[in-house]
Amino acid sequence: MKKNLKWLLPAFVLVTTVLLFRFVFFVGHVPTESMEPTIPKGSYILGCRIFGEPKVGDIIVFEHEGKQLVKRIAAVGGDVVEHKGRRLIIPQECFYVLGDNPDNSYDSRYWSEPFVSYRQVIGVL
């Protein structure tokens, strides 16, 4: 019986860690300069999957065209932005995102569909 108990704590820690990283936290990698100087190229990030309503200024991780991207929210639902020479109103539950390094960032400014929906957000840093 004592032999089995010595494995109980490590098993509990392992299961707890796996569950936390599956449902609460995530680890990501920033492969480009798009968020410099805030997040240097090559950085690993730790984010949280549990979050409230993201707001302007928050850094989010989201899915876009099959990739995970890291950008800063520049506008939220109801805000008006200039996009490719037109004034756009951001739809509710959507975001307009920009990288902190505008010269090296593929972000909302360049996408044909410039909005990130709330459902695409994986987490907040």
Image (spheres, rainbow, N blue to C red):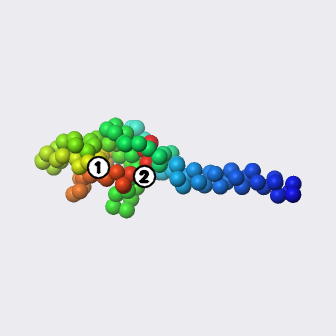
Left or right of 105? Residue 85 is: left
Residue at x 17%, y 47% (from the top left corner): 88
Please provide percent x and percent y for residue 58.
Answer: 37, 39
Q: CA distance from mark 1 to mark 2?
A: 14 Å
Q: Quadrant of the N terminus?
A: bottom right
Residue at which label 2 appears: 122
Left or right of 73? Residue 50 is: right
Please provide percent x and percent y for residue 10.
Answer: 73, 52
Residue at x 37%, y 42% (from the top left corner): 53
Left or right of 26? Residue 120 is: left
* Label 1 crowd (10 A; few <14 / some 14-19 / many >=20): many
Indicate the amino acid at tag 2: Ile
Please provide percent x and percent y for residue 55.
Answer: 34, 39
Label 1 SS: strand
Residue 8: which quarter of the image?
Answer: bottom right
Residue at which label 1 appears: 94
